[in-house]
Image (cartoon, rainbow, N blue to C red):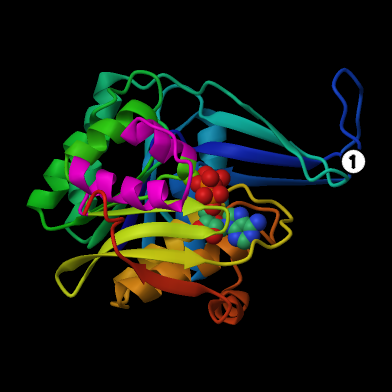
Amino acid sequence: MIVTVTLNSAVDKTLAVPNFRLGRRHRSVEQTTLPGGKGVNIARALKALGQPVIATGFAGGPTGTRIVEGLTAESVLTDFVRIREESRTNTAVLDPTTGLQTEINERGPRVSEQEVELFRDKLLYLAQGAQVCVFAGSIPNGVEADIYAGLIRELRKRGVSTIVDTDGEPLRLAVRAEPSVVSPNVLEAEELVGHEFNDDDDRIVAVHEMVELGAREAIMTASDGCFAEVIDDGTPQLYRVRLDPLEPVAAVGSGDAFLAGYVAARYTGSPPAECLRFGVACGAESTQHFGAGSVDPREVERLMGEIDVAPLALPAEVS
Ligand SMILES: Nc1ncnc2c1ncn2[C@@H]1O[C@H](COP(=O)(O)OP(=O)(O)OP(=O)(O)O)[C@@H](O)[C@H]1O
Ligand SMILES: [Mg+2]
């Protein structure tokens, strides 16, 4: 079983509004409402890829009920801690004439210490039947920034692989707790290693730096694939994975689909290079759908052949 953790789950509302302009009244021509938050999107994609997954985290109030019921309707298993305050609704406006997307995210609920304790108990209970646990997304008010770090340490003791996709302070602390995999995008990785990247050499060095900070494996996603340092037959190996970007319908959540693909392939025992290829195919395919975490496995298969996976060496000046 794979467990996904979403501490700041949400109802994600996406409105298609042609010629969106500030200060004007608009009518949406299309709209979707889906349970969301990164871990929830990853669970949706894992389900689509046929992997056994259970989504946990916090869900509160009528919006929390909608999240849980929405996932149940999608046949995604859930076991959320119900909290007193109301879960978030996030609104995105997608302008099909420009392809631009504007997002307005609510602040979300405050979670009490007692609710955090309930969650810890639940996760450690679920971990008994899990091989992999994915921590994804931001941390709500009231929850300490080191929550992922603490849970990573607990799960490692229990032999569960841990995967982290977050940013800022929670990511910095989580990496030091030696998770199995971290998977930031370029901006998040720049913040983590503390400098900007000017060229591909910088990007390759950055994934290696993330490993030196504590992650066993590090993947940095980019809009044309990813850079990664993974363990291949017991030894660290760097890869550059490339795919010509597709014209997106909606690119939001492509990082979540990438991670679901990578985790699904790992879970079924594929070699690391193939896991990266599959992840990139899933990330790309998801851009062709409106809802975050939606992937069509047949289209993913078709894209696999168009992806270039190249092993790399560390640039001379740092190796
Ligand atoms: N336009 C695109 N065409 C093809 N593949 C894409 C495109 N945009 C993103 N991808 C793929 O999706 C993966 C994740 O991309 P990216 O780094 O942009 O994610 P992200 O910023 O974490 O997104 P989010 O946080 O919204 O999920 C990458 O591996 C990339 O290959
Ligand atoms: Mg991301």
Residue placed most toward the observer, 64 or 258 = 258
Give me the residue at 41% from left, 36% from top.
Answer: 190
Residue at the outermost left position: 157
Task: Specify whether 80 is left or right of 95.
Answer: left
Q: Quadrant of residue 315?
A: bottom left
Q: Is residue 238 visible?
A: yes
| Secondary structure that dominates the magenta span | helix
Q: Which residue is mark 1?
A: 18
Which range is magenta? Answer: 187-216
Q: Residue at x 51, y 35 (%)?
A: 64
Report helix, strand or loop for mark 1: loop
Residue 181 against residue 26 in the figure, above or below: below
The verdict on label 1 being within 8 Å of ligand 1 is: no
Residue 107 lies, in percent from the top left, at: 53, 21
Q: Quadrant of residue 98?
A: top right
Q: Is residue 204 magenta?
A: yes
Q: Position of residue 255 (x, y in %)?
A: 50, 52
Q: Position of residue 121 (x, y in %)?
A: 19, 39
Locate residue 31: give its quadrant: top right
* 213 magenta-colored: yes
Residue 71: x %, y % from top left? 52, 53
Is residue 72 shown to the viewer in this render?
no
Residue type, numbered disc 1? Pro
Q: Is residue 216 toward the left or the right of residue 225 in the image? A: left
Which quarter of the image is occupied by the N terminus? bottom left
**Label 1, residues with CA under 10 Å away: few <14, some 14-19, many ≥20:** some
Identify the residue at horizontal 32%, vertical 55% (top origin).
Answer: 3
- Please state which of residues 285 and 13 is positioned toward the viewer in this rendering: 285
From this viewpoint, which residue is outermost toward the front?
317
Taking the image as shown, residue 149 lies to the left or right of residue 266, namely: left
Give the vertical position of 34 relative to 277 (above or below).
above
